[in-house]
Amino acid sequence: MLAQRSAVAAKEIRQLIAQSSDQISEATLQMGSADKTIGGGATHEQATGIAQVNEAVTQLDTATQQNAARVEQSAASAAGLKHGADSMSRSVAVFQI
């Protein structure tokens, strides 16, 4: 039961991470567009600020992708635990009290 709930939660987390990744990718594109638009008349400080925000968004995207990989690993572990628990239940079922 717990392994099944963990697998369901892992699936939901994967979906949320995928949505976040899509949003971060879109934000990265928008920041690049803003950088080009503002770039002509921007001061050095503004350009530096835009570059820092762009770097932060890139780091968020990287972290999101790493989290997605961890969720996949957790889901695989949960499935393995469920398989082991099912096997153990079948093995113990032969004993009667």
Image: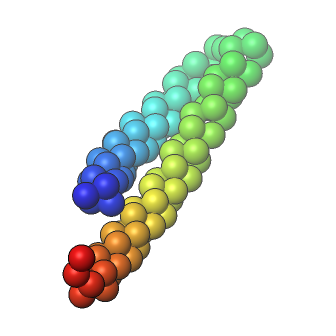
Name the residue furthest front.
97
Above or below residue 95? Residue 39 is: above
Which corner quadrant holds the C terminus?
Answer: bottom left
Name the residue furthest right.
44
Is 51 displayed left or right of 28 in the figure?
right
Above or below residue 5? Residue 27 is: above
- How many numbered marks are there? 0
Image coordinates of residue 3 in percent, x first then y, are 33, 60
User: What residue sits 51% from the left and 36% below the top?
Assistant: 28
Judge by depth and name the residue closer to the eye, 47 or 4: 4
Is 30 displayed left or right of 38 in the figure?
left
Image coordinates of residue 24 in percent, x first then y, are 46, 37
Residue 83, quarter of picture: bottom left
Judge by depth and name the residue closer to the eye, 26 or 76: 76
Image coordinates of residue 43 in percent, x first then y, are 72, 12
Please say whether residue 36 is visible from this viewpoint.
no
Which corner quadrant holds the N terminus?
Answer: bottom left
User: What residue sits 69% from the left and 14% below the top?
Assistant: 46
Please say whether residue 73 is visible from this viewpoint.
yes
Judge by depth and name the residue closer to the eye, 20 or 50: 20
Above or below residue 44? Residue 70 is: below
Image coordinates of residue 53 in percent, x first then y, are 62, 26
In this figure, which colouring scheme has been used for the structure? rainbow
User: What residue sits 35% from the left and 79% below the top?
Assistant: 88
User: What residue sits 52% from the left and 29% below the top?
Assistant: 31
